[in-house]
Amino acid sequence: MESATASPATITTTETSISRWREGVQATVPLWPGALLFGIVYAVTGRAAGLSPAQIVVMSLVVHAGASQFAAVNLIAAGAGPVSVIIATAITNLRHVLMGGSVAPHVAHRSRGWRALYAYHLSDESYGLATARFLAGDGTPAYALGTNMGMIVPWVGGAIIGLVVGGVLPNAHRWGVDLVGPLIFLALLVPLLGSRRTVGVAVVSSIFALVGVAVLPGAWYLLLAGIGGSAVGALWEQWGERRGATRQ
Amino acid sequence: MNEHWLTIAGMAVVTYASRAAFLVTGHGQFPLWLSRLMAYVPVALFAALALPAFVTTKGGVRVGPETIAGAVAALVAWRTGGKTIYVLFAGIGTFIVVRLVASYA
């Protein structure tokens, strides 16, 4: 009953935000083993490429993009200079333009400073978890920020473990650790397949992804499938509207 | 000071620029064609992030334990409305079982 005293509304809102943030962090926990192992492999490869321990950890903190960091240390090991590594990173991470754009309307009411912070650690995983919640109608910016920050733990932690233990790795593939990420994206995808159009987009995007995996380097297939799949969806929608307009 | 620090700084800048492009500038409002496109980005990216792991290896397209695991997980996702924890258990469980069975067969 003492809760009825000082500005309960403000307290409740802050408490809700904090619990939503914590929920976002917790949602990333199933992804930790996979990200941790990837972080270890990245750090071991980075050491072999001649990067210092500080450089390896700082890269994970300030770049925070698994696929492009792994590509970068492999390029450095092969003798690539700063310019080519930076260009490869820019192309690999262009898909984040799409992710930022697709999540932007859901956080548009937050301040520019908040959005600048949120953009900092946006990853495939945190984007997926947060967007699925937003589309289901119960997402909040606090939850989205929590999913971003949750992924920092295994990614930076994995790099540090990799520096300490070196190349001693369990055979993670045997236990399906590398399937956790794809399984979560599958779980997020299926509820969105409510119309013929979204099923069509998923099929087209899958075809682009398979072709992309076969012919493109690194994570570029994601950019191809992201743009190709969503363009087909947008064109289909426009075509459907035009046909509806002629019929009237 | 070596050139790796320069590389890291450049990588951080280009990566952040991609993430911030639409998030920091503007107010989440796009021209119609772009907002239509953005509405399909989740489906397109989720499919692309999921599928290849179940049907490809480094060599190319193949059907294996992970394909069966993916099919079972997709069925569970459909029946449970995408409950992550069930999908994970079904997918990983199927993968381990099929691998074990295949290794003794």
Image: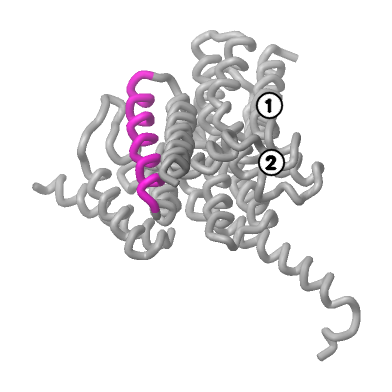
Depth check, front residue: A152 or A187? A187
> Is A45 colored magenta in this rendering?
no
Magenta span: A195-215
Depth check, front residue: A123 or B98? A123
Q: How far across and down, in percent of the image, does residue A196 sit? A: 35, 48
Residue occupying image coordinates x 50% and y 32%? A166
Badge 2 crowding class, 10 Å Cα cut-off, few under 14, some 14 to 19, many 20 or more, is: few
Residue occupying image coordinates x 29% and y 33%? B56
**Which chain does tag 1 point to?**
B
Asked if badges 2 and 1 are on one and the same chain, I answer yes
Most extreme residue toward the right is A6
Q: How far across and down, in percent of the image, does residue A167 sit? A: 46, 32
Quickly name the residue at label 2.
B29
Q: Where's the N terminus of chain A, which quadrant?
A: bottom right
Quickly name the residue at label 1.
B12
Q: Label 2 vs label 1: CA separation?
A: 26 Å
Residue occupying image coordinates x 33% and y 23%? A214
On screen, residue A129 versus residue B67, left or right, reads right
Does residue A118 appear in this view?
yes
**Which chain does tag 2 point to?**
B
Number of marks: 2
Residue occupying image coordinates x 22% and y 33%? B62
Q: In which quarter of the image is residue A24?
A: bottom right
Q: How far across and down, in percent of the image, does residue B45 sit? A: 47, 39
On screen, residue B73 versus residue A189, left or right, reads left
> Please, what is the dominant secondary structure of the magenta stretch?
helix
On screen, residue B17 versus residue A201, left or right, reads right
> Is A213 colored magenta in this rendering?
yes
Does residue A160 appear in this view?
no
